[in-house]
Amino acid sequence: MSQFWSPAVRDLEPYVPGEQPRDTVIKLNTNENPYPPAPGVGKVLADYPIDHLRRYPDPSSLALREALAAHYGVHVNQVFVGNGSDEVLAFAFKAFFCHEQPLAVPSISYSFYPVYCDFYGITPHKVPLTDSFEVDLDAFPADNGGIVFANPNAPTGHAHSRAAIEALLDKHTSRVVLVDEAYIDFGGESAIPLIERYPNLLVTGTFSKSRSLAGLRIGFAIGPADLIDGLDRVKDSFNSYPLDSVAVAAGVASIEDDAYYRACCAAVIATRERTTAALEACGIEVLPSSANFVLARPTTIEAGMLFDALRARGILVRYFNKPGLDQFLRISIGTDDEMDNLIDAVHAIVGEK
């Protein structure tokens, strides 16, 4: 801790990302897509004119916003893009949730939410999950400074229907409701069609998961035009060029190959279901998931011990050693071969106990 840090920095507890190893391992710890991006993305990267890099990118990222607007059937002024959905979320917290009233968030959800609360001085109101580890939409308090939750939830994987989210919006009309749809393409039902009827709904998404572009950092938000204008005001007060021109071109190419994207999502879903059945056959409890990961609870070995044993075999999963999650491992869905290796390793480790 430096003597030159401001008090606000000294008190921060930063988000801890999943390990990014340099050695060759089976990497199932950061929810990356196991398949490459759409072929058109590779062509964009191979053919991109290097001379374009000497110029600043379009500060509005209009080409990508137009592509997203066409894909989701909304107007371009209802689309915001940023440097990964984490940046989009950070701007949203600043734009909409800096109130005296607490921000309602699930007690177990994306672990960046409490970091943003600390960073902006927002008081969180943590709403416990149900006994089945679902976000309890009925438990969000009426008196709040906004609502944020992931759907499907991370790291539990449960997803609410669009009708359930609509019922939530009918009850909460005076503050922004932000639905984080980072994993929606793996079995969830998007709330985006609701934005025309609910002026306080903002939906965020990412190209890091279903579109296999985690390395380019592309995130977006879709909502009513005045909410998007609020995000733009924050962006232009912080960094008016959030997305580089290469990322914009690659993002557009990804959207254009819709069939490839859907096929990759279907493959991940099929592997997830097969993996769930195989883990359960090993005596592992697996929560129902609509994401590209599963949350698994060993029944014959401590989760931390299984994490260490898998790591010793070159298989990385995620272990959140904190209350409420310390009995679980979050396992990203990889290729069929990777998941077969995981299942074989789990079977061998559990058999030794």
Image: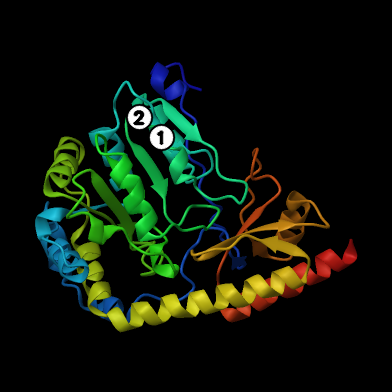
As helix, strand or loop, the secondary structure at mark 2 comes to loop
Can residue 5 be seen? no
Q: Position of residue 322 (x, y in %)?
A: 64, 39
Neighbourhood count class around disc 1 (C-alpha, 10 Å): few under 14, some 14–19, many 20 upward: many
Image x and y of residue 116, in percent: 39, 35
Inter-mark Cα distance, 2 to 1: 6 Å
Residue at the far right: name it. Answer: 353
Quick check: 185 left or right of 40? right
Q: Position of residue 20 (x, y in %)?
A: 53, 56
**Residue 33 visible in the picture:** yes
Does 156 appear above or below 112? below
Residue 197 placement (x, y as % from top left): 18, 52
Residue at (16% x, 61% y) in the render: 65
The first of marks 2 and 1 along the sequence is 1
The numbered dot on residue 104 is 1
User: What is the number of the mark on residue 261?
Assistant: none
Q: Nearer the viewer, residue 210 or 60?
A: 210
Q: Residue at x 56, y 60 (%)?
A: 22
Could you tell me which residue is drawn at 18 percent across and 61 percent down? 245
Left or right relative to 330: residue 167: left
Residues tagged 2 and 1 counted as in contact (Cβ below 8 A): yes
For the point 71% across and 48% down, the residue is 327
The secondary structure type at the circle numbered 1 is: strand
In the picture of the structure, the residue carrying the numbered disc 2 is: 144
Front position in the image: 132 or 250: 132
> Callout 2: 10 Å neighbours few (<14), some, many (20+)?
many
Is 344 on the left-hand or right-hand side of 245?
right
Q: Inspect the image, locate mark 1, and give the three-letter code of the amino acid beneath it.
A: Ala
Q: Amino acid at mark 2?
A: Asn
